[in-house]
Image: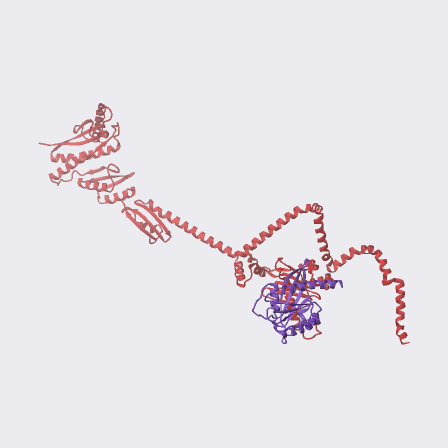
Chain colours: A purple, B red
Amino acid sequence: MIQKKICLLGASSVGKTSLVQQFVEGIFNEKYLTTIGVKVDRKTLPIANQEINFMLWDMEGNDSYNVFQERYLRGAAGYIIVVDQTRASSLHEGLDIHTLAQQVTNCPAILAINKNDLPATWHLDDSENESYKKLFDLQFSTSAKTGSNVEEMFLALAKLLVRFEKNDITT
Amino acid sequence: MSSHAAKEPTEPEQQLETVRTLILGKENSRITQSIEKDARRIVADVITEALHDRQKKDNSVDKVLQPLVEDSVKHSVAHNSEQMVSSLYPLVGSLVRKSVAAFLSDFMEKTNQLLENSLTVKGLKWRFKARQSGVSYAHYVASQTFVYRVEHVFLIHRETGLLLNSVALDNENKSDADIISAMLTAINDFVGDSFLTEHERPKEQLQAVSTDNFNLLIKPGPSALVVAAVSGNPPQSISNQLQLTVENIHSLYSDELNSFSGDNQDFDNSDNLLRDCLLSEQKIKTSKQKKTPWFAWAILVLVLLYTGYQALNWLKVTELKEKIMRLDNQPGVIIKQLIINDLNNITLDILRDPDALNIRHWLNSNEMNAKKFNIIERSYYSLDPEILRQRAQLIIKAYPNISFNWQDNTLALAGTLDITKTEQLLNTLAIAGFTTEDNLVTEQLQLISAQPIVESQQVKQQIFDELIGRIAAIQLNFSVASEEITPKMHSSLQRLYQYIRQLEPLAQELKINFGLLILGSSDNTGYKAANNIISTKRASNAAAILQQKGLAKDKMFVLGLGQVDIINISSRARTVMFNVMYTNEM
């Protein structure tokens, strides 16, 4: 069985835990509980005749008081930066985290713009979009509440990792 | 110039390199070629010794060989099964026997242990405590029976925190091993970074995590951690074993560890190494007596005590019953019912003759406390010989002139007594159960005739009449076709003779002449003539006896009546009747 460590990063209360919960258990809880430290979950995905075991490291949210700790990122096969489309500040914080993360790892990264069931307060214009696309391997607009794009995002990540590994081997 | 000067020091080196290339070939190819040519021979010469030396050094050869051997055996079984079967055949029989024996002994051991643990006080206590602390009984037993036991061993990739392999004692609970290993790594990272003070110093490493039931012992290596979940108090030896395992794994799997990309299949064969860490030590029994199932013994003793008590009680009751039933043999006492509720509450329902012994006295004199008895007593009139004797004794006591003795159960009176007293005595005795027909002999009783006659003529006449009446009341009953005088008839005739003797003086005084009519009769069966004869014979036989006793023949008149034709009587009228015929002297 192939196992992959996947980290979820982002500002606090953007919905990292809810995304994991939606993906692993298929449920959404309105109640907000802040994550302390890290919580690990597991989900097995079937990809091209084999199974990938995702060990999902759901990190505590980072803000000015709780600075991103790269320690948990060690050994990760990929990470997802989660931002909240109702809070513009979460995007900036997410980008900061991404910058920090890239200093310690070069694994694939995904940008998840969460809470797409709620009206957005900010939009990426074309030029912004282009510049972010370069920063991330993939970009998704998700909703942990409705489940929209959640499964798709993780599946795309799995495929990306398999391809990444193959490229890795060939190079 | 300056460039020439810079090249100069490298020239000899270049020359040397050129020479080296000429002699050894490009990249030592000449040497390696010649070695490769003989490689097979060279390795063949030393392979056995090399394996031996390496095995001796760090026991790593068998760990490498084991999966190979397993694979080849698996291959043989799959493809050459017949050959395997025939070569294993001689072994199989004894193997099966051994395994059955092992199973049986294991089963017995387990059953024994189960019984022991469930029947002892300890077992019950453990059950209670296990429930109290919310763990399963088996778990609690393990924690109590083992000083320590390694339940689970994890091999974790240090960099990613991913689980490489894990073994469990009971091959269960493997499902969450990957999450546990990830969380453990997260905690380890957290601890390592939290206490980091200086960048130069190596990161702090978590060595152990303790919970209520478990100690997680962590042995870190450069690329992987071995973690053991231990119940109880782990000794240093586990730590040493973990260290050894970490080292072995690093030496055997260094390439796999370094190139690990998430696929843990490469580590499947590390099972054997990890299993070496599944150590345990059983608690030494603090005392040998601990094995005694006290609880079972206590129950057994209680049962025995109760049975013993019941048996003793039963024995006592039986003994008492026997003792009381002896009362039934006492004359004039009949036990109707005896109920022994317990030894202090006995109901005794009896019939008792007033002349019989006193029940309470008897009980007391027979070592029984009469106070414990509830006696229901009703009176009856007993004809037991002993009671009769007692009663007779009491009656006769009132007559100082009369002595008595017993012939079998017949009372024989002797002595002298006047006629009225005699009558009185005989009457009383008759009421008490003594009759001249059954058990009373009065032949020795003599009447005082010399007694001065004070009675008036009238009284004498009365007595005379009564005697006549008594004589008339005497009747001898014969059996069919018999004229024989039976002993019973003898005593009747004796009485009759006594009456006649008493009559004689009275008759003289009253101036009366009298004679005795003796009438024989027969039933109506048979010939009349024969009946006449037998009736006469019966009468004359009776007369002959009286004559023997001393009654003058001329005072008797014997007559055979033949058959007496009276309804209801005639069929059984085989009798001799007596009658006194008297006339007054003129």
Q: Is residue B119 left or right of residue B522?
A: right
Q: Position of residue A72 (x, y in %)?
A: 66, 69
Which residue is pictured at 90% across the width and 70% down the height? B12
The quadrant in which residue B22 appears is: bottom right
The foreground one among B170 and B369 is B170
Q: Quadrant of residue B416?
A: top left
Is B301 left, or right, of B174 in this rendering? left
Q: Position of residue B177 (x, y in %)?
A: 63, 62
Residue B260 in view in this figure: no
Is B278 left or right of B16, judged from the image as shown? left
To which quarter of the image does residue B89 belong? top right
Q: Position of residue A3 (x, y in %)?
A: 67, 62
Return the residue found at the far front: A126
Question: Image height check: is B577 above or below B355?
Answer: above
Count of residue discs: 0
A139, A6: nearer the viewer: A139
At which x and y percent is residue B555? Answer: 16, 29
Q: Nearer the viewer, residue A33 or B185?
A: A33
Query: Is residue A57 visible in the rendered structure shown here?
Result: yes
Extreme residue in the left direction: B586
Q: Split into 4 quadrants, where in the image is the N terminus of chain B? A: bottom right
* B94 vs B366, nearest the viewer: B94
Q: Quadrant of the C terminus of chain B?
A: top left
